[in-house]
């Protein structure tokens, strides 16, 4: 048993391959099968004449699971290319009643913030709300139960949209924010847990890392290193079907079939459902949402409002989810004479608009909220179709059931199952590789 095939050359598939190579004591024959002509999946950086736009993720957090990502960066020899968010990016904004408000980044600014002051009592009262041992509940129900509808609408809704692109009324608390559930059960209160763990403000606390030449450096460096170690990456090779035999698996591509002892699927759930129809019903229950990233660059600095960006609560009834001020966050990426922004637009709007209309919509929003009226130097629209899987109520049980129904030589990885962030994907790749190496 020394053959492993990994389906999908996104960060999940590549990192699983990396840790398998790193941990295995004996030679493994590893292949990665990727349908496109490039690796990285949603991690993609557009670069032209020194202009840099991130089409997918802007960065990763260096704390928590991010420590593993930093270790990987070191393993790949990319430390010198790593950059940290500028201190200016600590300042974040929230759109409230049509105006941008700065989000407090400490207790003092919380107490003095006109927007947040009315909620202080509710925040502190939460310590007295009794625990309820509910198996799973939506993020919205949890925050209504322990805090208030107002806090849900003002703080949690934009945070959830910003991270998951989803609806707190549908998403599962224990899958999306497992720590908060733990704080309630183990420390008796979310606020106590946040205080004790110094995580009071998730919107401003953690910094962000990227690479001077953009996030795509990570999967590119990883794939080059893997190829150097003898891992075979099949490009332009969409998997058509998967056939599980007693002790082996056969992967059918359009022009050949490959046999393996161990199969890891790091495909999005819908792609896997097509290749593996016997699990299609369960896999298709995992919904995912579409977002568009409209990147815009202007000559020079066009506004006094500086920081990380702003989020937009749903009740503002705007067409956008939020805006990041990319050149404020990572000024060392790309040309210094340009200011860069990304306007995130949700799936509903994307469905009914053409690309040019999405650009128009983004420009209108930058005018309305940041006062930028200048003609842009460059724009780019990236539509990430069904890119963000939704961990809806019951997601954990659904995953357990999918895992239990897979043949013993068939493993899952990827953002469809084990967390959305790059850190989650890499962390799970490491855990999975450890498990497989033990079995072999
Ligand atoms: C717009 C956007 C912004 C984001 N921002 C952040 C951020 O700032 N920070 C952060 O941590 N995370 C962010 N994320 C999330 C993160 O980028 C993704 O969750 C992560 O990159 C997913 O990696 P993956 O390998 O699991 O999946 P994918 O990237 O989806 O990779 C799956 C791979 O499988 C391939 N494939 C699909 N079907 C087949 C087939 N039939 N045969 C062979 N190959 C196939 C695909 O081509 C792809 O390469 C963002 C995501 C998006 C879309």
Image (tube, grey):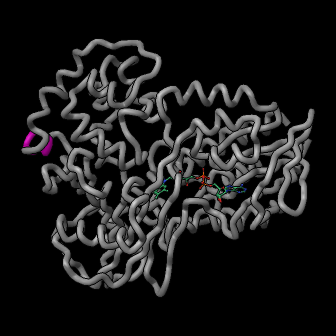
Tell which of 144 and 92 is nearer to you. 144
Above or below for 397 versus 62: above
Find residue 374 and report its horizontal and vertical position in percent: 22, 82
Q: Within the magenta stretch, is there residue 96?
A: no
Q: Residue at x 63, y 48 (%)?
A: 268
Find residue 133 and report its horizontal and vertical position in percent: 41, 12
Left or right: residue 97 versus residue 93 is left
Quarter the N terminus occupies = top right
Task: Give the quarter of the image for residue 360.
Answer: bottom left
Tell which of 21 and 157 is nearer to you. 157
Tell which of 105 and 178 is nearer to you. 178
Q: Residue at x 78, y 67 (%)?
A: 228
Most distant residue in the front direction = 352
Left or right: residue 398 versus residue 143 is right
Find residue 34 and report its horizontal and vertical position in percent: 73, 60
Quarter of the rendered image showing ligand 1: bottom right
Task: Give the quarter of the image for residue 110.
Answer: top left
Left or right: residue 91 versus residue 380 is left
- Report the predominant secondary structure element of the magenta stretch: helix
Q: Give the residues drawn in magenta, as a range.
A: 109-113
Find residue 338 and report its horizontal and vertical position in percent: 32, 81
């Amino acid at each position: 048993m020394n053959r492993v095939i990994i389906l999908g050359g996104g960060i999940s598939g590549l990192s699983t391959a990396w840790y398998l190579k790193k941990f295995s004591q004996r030679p493994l024959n590893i292949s990665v099968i990727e349908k496109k002509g490039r690796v990285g999946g949603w991690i993609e950086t557009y670069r032209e004449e020194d202009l840099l736009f991130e089409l997918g993720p802007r960065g990763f957090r260096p704390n928590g699971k991010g420590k593993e990502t930093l270790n990987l960066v070191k393993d790949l020899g990319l430390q010198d290319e790593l950059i940290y968010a500028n201190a200016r990016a600590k300042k974040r904004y929230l759109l409230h009643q049509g105006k941008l408000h700065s989000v407090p980044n400490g207790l003092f600014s919380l107490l003095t913030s006109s927007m947040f002051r009315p909620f202080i009592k509710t925040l502190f009262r939460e310590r007295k709300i009794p625990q309820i041992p509910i198996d799973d509940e939506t993020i919205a129900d949890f925050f209504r139960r322990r805090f208030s509808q107002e806090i849900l609408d003002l703080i949690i809704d934009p945070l959830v949209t910003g991270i998951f692109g989803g609806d707190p009324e549908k998403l599962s608390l224990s899958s999306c924010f497992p720590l908060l559930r733990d704080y309630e059960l183990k420390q008796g209160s979310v606020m106590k847990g946040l205080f004790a763990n110094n995580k009071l403000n998730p919107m401003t606390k953690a910094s962000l890392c990227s690479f001077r030449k953009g996030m795509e450096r990570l999967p590119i460096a990883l794939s080059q290193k893997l190829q150097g170690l003898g891992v075979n990456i099949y490009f332009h090779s969409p998997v058509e079907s998967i056939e599980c035999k007693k002790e082996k698996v056969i992967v059918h591509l359009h022009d050949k079939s490959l046999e393996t002892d161990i199969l890891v699927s790091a495909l999005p759930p819908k792609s896997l459902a097509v290749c593996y129809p016997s699990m299609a019903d369960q896999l298709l229950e995992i919904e995912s949402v579409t977002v568009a990233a409209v990147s815009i660059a202007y000559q020079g600095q066009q506004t006094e409002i500086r920081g990380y960006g702003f989020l937009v609560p749903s009740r503002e009834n705007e067409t956008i989810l939020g805006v990041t001020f990319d050149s404020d966050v990572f000024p060392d990426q790309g040309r210094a004479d340009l200011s860069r922004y990304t306007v995130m637009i949700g799936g509903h709007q994307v469905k009914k608009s053409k690309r040019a209309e999405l650009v128009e919509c983004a420009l209108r929003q930058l005018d309305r909220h940041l006062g930028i009226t200048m003609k842009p130097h460059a724009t780019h629209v990236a539509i990430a179709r069904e890119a963000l899987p939704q961990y809806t109520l019951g997601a954990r049980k659904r995953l357990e059931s999918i895992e239990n129904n897979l043949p013993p030589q068939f493993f899952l990885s990827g953002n469809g199952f084990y967390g959305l962030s790059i850190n989650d994907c890499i962390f799970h790749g490491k855990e999975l590789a450890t498990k497989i190496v033990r079995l072999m």
